[in-house]
Image: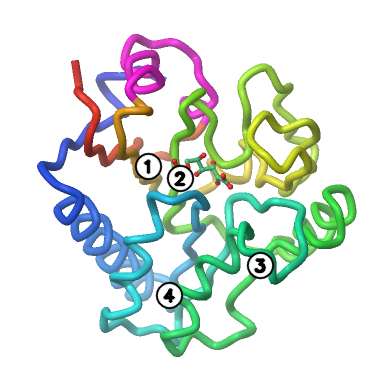
Amino acid sequence: MSLNVHTRWHAFPSQTAIHEAARDRILAAAETAIAQHGNFLIVLAGGSTPKAVYALLAQAKADWSNWHVYHNDERCLPADHDERNSKMAREVWLNHVPIPPQQIHDIPAELGNIAGAKAYTETLKGVRSFDLVILGLGEDGHTASLFPGHAVDNSADAVPVFNSPKPPADRITLSQQRLNNTHEVMFLVTGVGKQAAVDQWRQGVAIPATLIHSPQGVDVYCYGVVLN
Ligand code: 6PG
């Protein structure tokens, strides 16, 4: 992937600006996909950065009945655990909009990483290319639950993760290949802690985040990091 051609960096002047821009981008992607396919397939990121965007979406008007929601990764914890990505998304957003419940696809990580990954791979069987994959960036350059130093596992659409350096150790992630099977990719990156990972990325170092791209390239929405 050539940095200049495929990766578009967007610096925003405030938290509000980045959150609103991300919300608007998601709503626009939904309109385009629904016009084209009759539905919108979005893959959510966990972590703290997207949370404020999801809260804005809870207030937005959209054709919710045609949204289908997936997750890019999940932590192997009980379904109602506060650290579950699916719980966060439901509490701040999905419980407040009329997306049909059968169109919200949590990763069943409470089954453990092996059984849960198998089950989610079944869920994804026959699902067309995603329209929009949202991703966060970890301080070590990870994205979804693809961590530095871990072998890339493309053996299934959803794969187990062991020994994650970010707790909990057991996780489930969509594979690199399945994440890349998407029309668009948007990273949400906020906070000075992400500076080193951003610098590496922009210098062409192969951090896990650079594994993910789409035919439309990659948009990286940033706040609080300097784009040197
Ligand atoms: C998770 C993630 C992870 C996250 C990044 C960024 O479950 O922890 O999906 O990949 O997106 O670590 O997280 P923050 O936005 O909280 O910095």
Q: Identify whether 201 is placed above or below 75.
A: above
Q: Identify whether 28 is placed above or below 207.
A: below
Taking the image as shown, residue 49 lies to the left or right of residue 103, namely: left
Mark 2 to mark 4 CA distance (whole Å): 17 Å
Pointer 3 with pointer 4, Cβ within 8 A: no
* Upstream in sequence: badge 2 or badge 4: 4
Task: Look at the image and give the residue range highlighted in magenta.
Answer: 195-211
Between residues 81 and 64, which one lies in front from this camera angle?
81
* Upstream in sequence: badge 2 or badge 3: 3
**Residue plotted at (20% across, 50% down):** 15
Density class for disc 4 (Cα within 10 Å; few <14, some 14-19, many ≥20) is many
Mark 2 to mark 3 CA distance (whole Å): 16 Å
Q: Is mark 2 within 8 Å of ligand 1?
A: yes
Density class for disc 3 (Cα within 10 Å; few <14, some 14-19, many ≥20) is many
Q: Amino acid at mark 1?
A: Phe
Mark 1 to mark 3 CA distance (whole Å): 20 Å
**Residue plotted at (86% across, 54% down):** 112
